[in-house]
Image: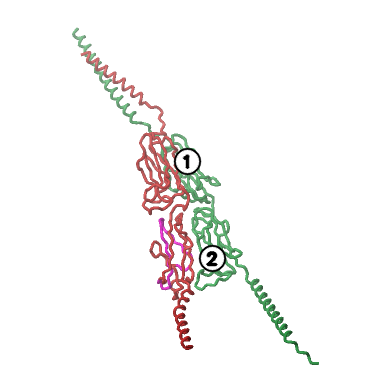
Amino acid sequence: MNARIFALIVAILGMLVASGIPASNGRGAPLPTLSIISPTPNEVIGNGTPVAIVFAVTNFNLTDPGNGTSSPNSGHIDVFVDDALTAQTSVNTIVLPLPSGPHTIRLRLVTDNGSALNPDVTASVSVMVTGGPDSGTPGLSIVFPRGGALVGTDSTLSFQVTNFVLVAPGGPAGVPNDGHIQVYLDNASYAELTDDAPLHLNLKDGPHNVTLQLVDNQGGPLSPDVTASLYITVQALLGRVTPFDATPYLALANLLIGLGILAAIYRKLEVR
Amino acid sequence: MRPHPRPPMQRGKVRRVSTMLALVALLSLLGVSLSSSTAVAAAPSLTIVSPVDGAMIANGTPVLVDFRLANFAFVQPGQAGQIGSPNEGHANVFLDAQYVRLLTVVEPFSLALTSGAHTIRIQLVADNGTPLNPDVSASVSVVATHGPDGGVPHVTILSPTPLEATGHGLYVSYRIENFTLVEPRGQPNAPNEGHVQLLVLRDVVMEVTQYDPVLVVSLPEGDISITVRLVNNDNTALSADASSTVEIHVIASSSVSLPLVSNGGIALLLAFILVVLILRRRKLSAGDANARGGNP
């Protein structure tokens, strides 16, 4: 009886050892973790500045790639930008210069030989990089000429843009505070501006309306719409000094001479 | 005389007293050693060596931050089996309160700065990321600019020359010293950077960021002044005015117009026809008179 009880106790202990010890080992060695501290999700990185990625790991020793250590709890980080391997790092900050547009940055813990951990340990963040400022409302104003001005056929229009950077059209969509200027003359598309140089206008006589509009890389208006408009009147030879304009007098002379010719012809016919 | 042996109850009391004395002595020794170790371990310190406070970071370059650390060891946070120690950890770097770096090595690092004033702060933290107690941090204020770090901004008009007679359109060329032109985008003002305003008489007719000559058209007739002025990003004048003015004379161009030409031409043609008609009439009249005189 005692031998049976003893055998039962031994069996139970054996089962406990067989099932419990590995489980307790699994709980005792926590898995590595990885988290991105900065930038925050969907953060706008302004002024085209490089993106500083700060991350934290736990239960993982960061070591320089290729140092020969082979441990599941040590290695380095592979950095992927838009799913392309871009860099490797073994320190908690990496700085990446990125072009304008949306980007997804993904970090992955790997062992020294470059293989992913099992299970895979990754962290990712989406950011928006823009050449413009990361905040502020875009603004547009016409510096010269003033509204209602009388200008010559040859004139220039100077403008100023704030909180917005001018870049060539065709870049990625949805980039804040970055795009170009669409110019409308009398409500018809006239030009696209991608720099601050004053716009040279060569217009025919009469009233005109010039409108500048900030648009995104795809040519769409911003939300809210940002425009600047002015009415000008173009007059040829504006600014030229005309000491004496004989045009009306010559017209009168033409009339008188014409009458004289008619009279001369009539007299000639009368004589005959 | 033989001493009397102590009774058992008294012996136990003596033993307890001696045990308590031994514990007190041990605790006092431990206390002494602990207090002496606290006195020996100096407090961590952190100093930013470069840049110095108020420094100007010129030419649009990143700032290189160099710092010194004492009584504190940098370790990578989150290592396997890591047990924190009061004098070890890492550092967090903030640029204008924005978290930008986590430092685990004592070596200079660079930060890209936009134009304007900035504050760089480094803070020591424990392995778990909490600040030390008391807090150990160092900060420095700098001013970043795309311009040079020295010299007085200056502009000189090279063309047109003073009292030059020109047409209604001309190129204005100028030379700029100790000043960098940047597109005004609403960014803060910064030393030795900004843009150019071009004035005809007293009106601002252009704002440009180019070093190349600027074409000005439709200039008014007569004696006028052209001014080139350096201004800050927000269009305000520099603290020490930097401008150059030149007086020129815009000459009248031909003011002949199409109506004038056409009217004048037609008048000449009609006048010619009239003269011809008059001359022919006189000739006919003279012929008739001769005929009457010869054969009355």
List the residue tagged with mark 2: B129
> How many C-alpha atoms fall within 10 Å of the one at disc 2: few (<14), some, or many (≥20)?
some
Q: Are marks 2 and 1 on the same chain?
A: yes
Q: Is residue B286 left or right of residue A191?
A: left
Which type of secondary structure does the marked residue at label 2 adopt? loop
Q: Is there a contact, CB below 8 Å, between mark 2 and mark 1?
A: no
* Residue closest to the far top: B296
| Amino acid on which disc 2 is placed | Gly
Image quarter of residue A190: top left
The residues colored magenta run A89-115
Q: Does residue B37 lie above or below A192 as drawn?
A: below
Which type of secondary structure does the marked residue at label 1 adopt? strand
Label annotation for residue B204 = 1
- Kindly report which numbered mark, 2 or 1, lies closer to the viewer in this rendering: 2
| Amino acid on which disc 1 is placed | Val
Locate residue A18, reporting x and y percent: 44, 80
> How many C-alpha atoms fall within 10 Å of the one at disc 1: few (<14), some, or many (≥20)?
some
In the figure, the green chain has which letter? Answer: B
Q: Colour of chain A?
A: red
